[in-house]
Image (cartoon, helix red, strand yellow):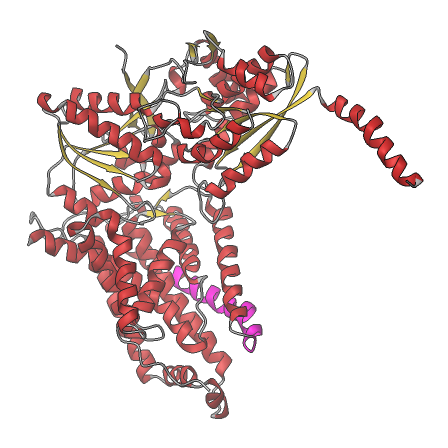
Amino acid sequence: MNAFLRLAVAFLFVVAPFASAQESSVIKIVSSFPRTGSAKNQTDSIVYGITMAFEEAGWKSGSFTIKFEDLDDATAAAGQWTAEKEAANADQAIKDADVMIYIGTYNSGAAKVSMPKLNQANMLMISPANSWPGLTKPGKGDQGEPEKYRPSGKINYVRVVPADDIQGVVSADWALKLGLKKVFILDDREVYGKGIADLFHARADELKDQGLTVLGHEGIDAQAQEFKPLMTKIKAKGPQLIYFGGTTQTKAGQLVKDMLAVGLDAKFMCPDGCFEEAFIDSAGADNLEKRALITFGGLPPEKLTGKGGAFVANYKKKYGKDPEGYAVYGYECGKVALEAVRRAGKKDRDAIRAAGLTIKNFDGALGKWSFDKNGDTTLRTMSGNTVKGGKFTFETLLGED
Amino acid sequence: MLIFLQQLINGLTTGTLFALIAIGYTMVYGIIELINFAHGDLFMLGAFLALTIVTKLGLEHAGPAGAVAGITLTFAICMVFCALLNFAQDRIVYRPLRNAPKLTPLVSAIGVSFVFMGLGQIWKGVADINFPDVIPNRNLLGNSELRFTAKDLLVILVTVPLMAGLTVFVRFTKLGKAMRATAQNPIASRLMGIDVDRVIGWTFAIGGLLAGAASVIYGLTINTVSFQMGYQNGLYAFTAAVLGGIGNLPGAMLGGIVIGLVRSLGSQYVGEQWTSALVFGILILLLVFRPSGLLGARTREKV
């Protein structure tokens, strides 16, 4: 063994452990959201929310220093999340020994990609926005869900937002309450959009004897640029309401415009994927006035009180604009991440994962809530919103029973 | 029957729009055998410029006379802008590659497409943007169940004269003749004293001119613009060009209209989610039985 090699071996065994020992007080948390493409405003707001949670804690949790990295799961060419980017983000997080928590994703479809990977790495994953029920709830999603996302057999995924099995149901109830009995259902054929539209459909069928009629249910091609032929066809059926399971990115705005273009005078209801300024910008404020009905899995920012209210006030002060609907969920994710690290008390992925799942009666910005045995929030309150004067306006509470 | 007619109108109006863009693809291919992938994104930049002008002029709240004047001005500016940009693109990117292997300009075209998309992103951001509703959505047929709106009329009023003008131009003017000659055999054309590079430059400019017109129509009738619109519409337009027989002008027009009709009638009678599959299914079938497209000439012998 020559001298150089000896030195190198000595370094490996003697010096290297000290170098990593210094790093062991640093815990890295990454997030993965579509940071390019049309969801950018919403995800900016979420990332601001997460950052604010860490800032308020002084970038510390217990004895650990928190570092945060904001990853992008979208590409400019696709304009939205891609499976390749999301998988690469998960791999990057797993390979980096300092990363303990993964905050994400925005799209339920993306979560399906990264969940099984992170599960095998025992890494806690916290989502501010995924609402596909199958990610957590046995029997509420497709065959084999959610077990197939949990190859290790342990649960590593939690979410702070209520799932769509609640949102789809309360949306149909709301339509009935408003007297909008003839409904045509559309969806964007994605996990989130089709999922929620199917749940709406199932609930509407249950309410048949109370007069709710489904005139039809079709999937759209979200890459298409206009939908006049589709709206022409729907108009002939005479609906009072069009329910769209989809997001701003899957052409909700264009559907409203083409509905008006063919002279179809009906209401337009859509879920929380459209609860963002971008929806109003893309659809045109005038077109949504007295027409759009948007459900959201929680209270809109201006209705938050207590810690949530304080968050909204601080956010406005810091960034000079109103937070998007999901900002507070990002903030809550940040808080949950810090709490999980504090409870675990050591830099160990599995300990932090287990600690995250034990969070109960958490006094956060969304109120007092717990994670249930599947990793779902116990919050169930939803809001129904309209658009007035180019702004989302809170209309009614939904699902309070 | 009424619905069938309505879907015919829907299909024709979007179809002619695809046709206008398709002409840009087909002309450039016809003359230098380059599939100019950046053409759709050029169209997108035109639409962004149109949005800027329409917003700056406040056309949404202008009276009828003001709106007509403003729209005419928008058309003029956007058409010239796209023509110049397309011309510049040829001058800067493709002309130095004229004698390079065919793949080189093709890959460069993809690069230009990304550059344009990036510019669009910087210019207007990434979200879909509402294009102000300048043209009233009133039914011109009075209270009839059948709807033919001012927007539909605008599409016809602009596209038909443009296509007719282009056909006459290519067939009867000296420059048109030079274009046809260059398309047939660039070397022989040069030997006959035709300034081939100038003719190619004009071809790009004319393609751009039509894309500029299409972009304004698109904004005014579809009412949404985004930096991705070029990609999707470009794909359909390119399909239209191939369907009609790439390199063939009337073919591109016909191809565009066929695609528009397949989309609207397909949505009505088959199902909205199948429209794209139908369009490309028909394309594949057609290419199996008629590889040169609907109106395309039998493949020329190239030495």
Q: Residue furthest front?
A: A1
Residue A13 sits above or below residue A87 on the image: above
Residue B103 sits above or below residue B192 on the image: above
Going by the image, does B112 lie left or right of A22? left
> Residue at (37%, 54%) from the top-left corner?
B232
Magenta segment includes B79: yes
Magenta segment includes B163: no
| Residue A204: image location, x then y, percent | 17, 26
Asked if residue B162 shows in the view, the reply is no
Q: Residue furthest bottom?
A: B192
Q: Which of A33/A326 is in front?
A: A33
**Total tally of numbered discs in the picture:** 0
Instruction: Give the magenta-colored segment's residue range.
Output: B78-100
Asked if residue B167 shows in the view, the reply is yes
Q: Which of A145/B58 is in front?
A: A145
Quarter occupied by the N terminus of chain A: top right
| Residue B280: image location, x then y, percent | 30, 59
Q: Which of B298/B173 is in front?
A: B298
Quarter occupied by the C terminus of chain A: top left
The image quadrant of residue A188 is: top left
Q: Residue furthest right?
A: A3
Residue B88 sits above or below residue A106 on the image: below
| Residue B92: image location, x then y, percent | 56, 68
Residue A372 sits above or below residue A86 on the image: above
Going by the image, does B267 lie left or right of B115? left
| Residue B217: image location, x then y, percent | 30, 56
Q: Main secondary structure of the magenta part?
A: helix
> Residue at (41%, 66%) from the top-left corner?
B208
